[in-house]
Amino acid sequence: MINVFYTQSSVDGGPMGDRDQSRVRMGFLPNWIGFNMTKEAGDLKLGARSSFWVTVNDTDVFRGAEGLGTRSGIDVRQFYGTVDGDFGQVLIGKDFGLFSRSNIMSDELLLGHGQVSDTLGLLDGGNVSFGNIGSGYVYPFPVAQITYRSPVVSGLQFAGGIMDPSKPDSASSEEMPRFETELTYQRDLNGVAFKTWIGGLYQSSESGGSNVDSRGVSGGVNVKFGGLSLTASAVDGQGLGTVAGLSNLVTSENNDVQGYLTQASYTVGANRFVLSYGENESSNDPLLMGADAEYANSAVALFHDVNENLKLVAELNRTEVTVGGSDFEDTDTIAVGAVLTW
């Protein structure tokens, strides 16, 4: 997949003050190329996937450590093997986590742009925009894991895995891995497609003589009939970061995060229209020196399929950041771009 957007952002407030910024950059997803392999081995089906995610807008030296000249960063987000059989599937290797995974994969703006803000360092960032990460859900970082997925029975499937734990600091102690689960249910009744999911996360760390217990619940529902699609999802966590479901972004379990995302889309012919609103509320926010904060993003978007490989996108986002109950930053972003897929 290759995607590039022209964006124009206008910022009111925030850590950098009022300013305007035009960019030529990637959207929510990096550009990537992936390779899949399968082999039948008796009663088993063996598989593997490797994917390489590439940033194209990381060359400006004024973007700090991200200013790499022509040495664009390559991010190996997936490198795993699978074993499938009558029992289901076992995955070993690096892949996206289970917690909040369906929240982000169900985002109508997945192939679009989404939010940027100076508060999160995204306006001039040398990598992706943020979609609704931090303003609707937390990000399921790719992580080393051993995950089991059950067969689908009457639309119901269970997934559970152990993940390489995240460390609050280099000297922390983790006696157990991180545990993540997800339960999904899908049915199609009389032309109405229904999907719902719920996931969970738990990890315990000891740091500086105190325990940091990270836990969370994520879930959502999607209903489709005709050209209309309605999606609502939510996340609630303790000891998690504001934008990522990992404990290494917090200093204690006093950091709470609650978020939700509501979206509606309508597809007619080659056009898909999207309305989106999401927000995250964070207490003791580690990104803002322990303050209470709220990140919200409103979006309207149009996706037009020129053909099955080329998609044109026009999108308007308004990102609002509130700190301690007071307005901190408002950012309006117009994004127009193209997405090529093979």
Image (tube, helix red, strand yellow):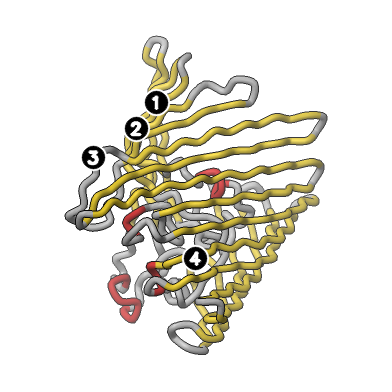
Tell which circle, 3 or 1, labels the residue nearer the N-terminal end.
1
Query: Which of the two residues, 249 or 228, is positioned nearer the viewer here?
Result: 249
Query: Do residues under tags 1 and 2 come within 8 Å of each other at their CB atoms?
Result: yes
Using the numbered discs, state the Cα–Cα distance from disc 1 to disc 2 in whole angstroms. Answer: 7 Å
Q: Give the residue type that dot 2 points to.
A: Ile
Residue that label 4 marks: 129
Q: Give the residue type that dot 4 points to.
A: Ser
Neighbourhood count class around disc 2 (C-alpha, 10 Å): few under 14, some 14–19, many 20 upward: some
Using the numbered discs, state the Cα–Cα distance from disc 3 to disc 1 in whole angstroms. Answer: 23 Å
Residue 89 point in image, percent of width and height: 44, 24
Q: In which quarter of the image is residue 63?
A: bottom left
Residue that label 1 marks: 90
Using the numbered discs, state the Cα–Cα distance from disc 4 to disc 2 in whole angstroms. Answer: 29 Å
Look at 64% across and 53% down and name the residue there.
108
Tell which circle, 3 or 2, labels the residue nearer the N-terminal end.
2
Residue that label 3 marks: 175
Is residue 27 among the parts visible in the rendering? no
Look at 33% across and 59% down and name the residue there.
252
Q: Give the residue type that dot 3 points to.
A: Glu
Query: Which of the two residues, 202 or 31, is positioned nearer the viewer here?
Result: 202
Residue that label 2 marks: 146
Query: Which of the two residues, 258 or 96, is positioned nearer the viewer here?
Result: 258
* Mark drawn on residue 232: none
Query: Do residues under tags 4 and 3 come within 8 Å of each other at their CB atoms?
Result: no
Give the left or right position of residue 309, taking residue 172 as reference. Answer: right
Residue 250 point in image, percent of width and height: 35, 60
- From what the image shows, is residue 316 above or below residue 29? below
Using the numbered discs, state the Cα–Cα distance from disc 4 to disc 3 in whole angstroms. Answer: 35 Å
